[in-house]
Image (cartoon, rainbow, N blue to C red):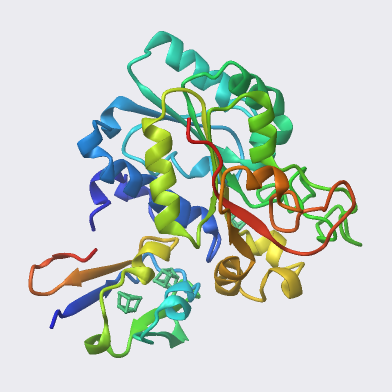
Amino acid sequence: MKEYSITIRDDLCKGCAICVEICPKNILAMSPESTVSGYLLAQIIEVKKCIGCMECELHCPDLAIEVIDKNEKVPAG
Amino acid sequence: MILDKYLRSEVFPTPFCQGCGHGILMQAILRAVDESASDGIDIDKMAFVSGIGCAAWIPSPHFAADTLHTTHGRPIAFATGIKLVNPSLKVVVVSGDGDLSAIGGNHLIHSARRNLELTVICANNSIYGMTGGQVAPTTPCGIKTATTQQGSTEPPFDLCRLVWGAGATYIARSTVYHIRELIKYLKNAFLHQGFSFIDVISPCYTHFGRRNPQRAGATPSEMVLNLKNIAIHAKSPQELFTFPSVGTLSPPSGRTCNQKDRILIGEFTTI
Ligand code: SF4
Ligand code: SF4
Ligand code: SF4
């Protein structure tokens, strides 16, 4: 089975929650506390169940999230 | 990430509001460029031209490419000049609905009429975002804006029908939610010989959604996800003319003001 890892760049994320709501596997959630910039950030809660569908990465308006295929060490999709 | 080579990383984060659809469109354009490499599309042989408005910030300053940020409504005029001087360049206009269809409406219809070899990408948030949320020619009926506080009473433009009537030879509409289709249409537009136009419905929560939460969605993310519910895939290109409503977020039926939110998406020409 393929495994994926996800990176979220805190310096880019504006906390819009699009990735959280679009993910079919509930891999992501919003952080409870805001950052210096005042945004709540997207966080990874259960990366194991990620199916690498790329919905989160493709719909992030701030290019903050990247899905990586762990076996191939390359971007998924 | 895969798009890093096309980006000026030093200008990030973007100036867009939280959850603005324009960021998703920015990504779609660059992915279309990347996926078109095998068809001879090369960002170093492209020029991106934008007017004024939030959407005009999509290519400039973010793209590591030749970008021209011009005056309000005039990107197509500048793009025409670039194409005349250097016909080998792939010239792409990225601008908003207000810039392209209102202030620069004449340039849009005449470049379509002349079938100029340009790709025009309209980032359609159906409102004037940057200037504070005034009503635009694309604002759906009943939508509250800074200048229509009881809701707009005028039917909006269907930009795809408009450029079809003017003579465009590639016409498509998609939304930032339907990003995979959007990338496909962008690739087709880049390879098209002649005038290509893509109407991209791109939510502006700050000015549109915030004032119309029941219709548009109560948060930026709801607004993006709501596009899935209101978009209808055209079964044939002819449906552009038979669809009982006219484009954008809440199209009118005929010339009456219809408040039902439906968007017809698809490719409307295959010339
Ligand atoms: S979609 Fe992007 S900007 Fe929005 S919360 Fe997720 S990572 Fe952050
Ligand atoms: S790749 Fe798909 S399953 Fe994995 S986190 Fe993103 S949206 Fe969820
Ligand atoms: S005002 Fe609207 S269109 Fe402009 S950046 Fe903000 S959300 Fe996007």
Depth check: B61 or B236 in front? Answer: B236
Residue A37 x, y percent position in the rendering: 46, 71
Q: Quadrant of residue B261?
A: bottom right
| In this view, B205 is above or below B30 | below
**Ligand 2 sits in quadrant:** bottom left
Left or right of B108? Residue A45 is left
Identify which residue, B105 or B36, lies in the foreground.
Answer: B36
Nearer to the camera, B87 or B243: B243
| Residue at the top extreme of this rendering | B85
In the image, residue B68 lies at what x, y percent? Answer: 46, 28
- Residue at image position (64%, 31%) is B163
Is residue B261 at least partly visible in the picture? Answer: yes
Quadrant location of the N terminus of chain B in the rendered image? bottom left
Please report the residue visible at 23 percent of the width from the left and 46 percent of the height from the top: B5
**Residue B47 rendering spot, x and y as whole percentages:** 39, 27
Q: Is residue B59 above or below residue B153?
A: above
Up/down of B269 relative to B194, above or below: below
Query: Where residue B236 sits: x, y (%)?
Result: 56, 48
Q: Is residue B15 visible?
A: no
Query: Closer to the camera, B254 or A62?
Result: B254
Which residue sits at x=47%, y=23%? Answer: B194
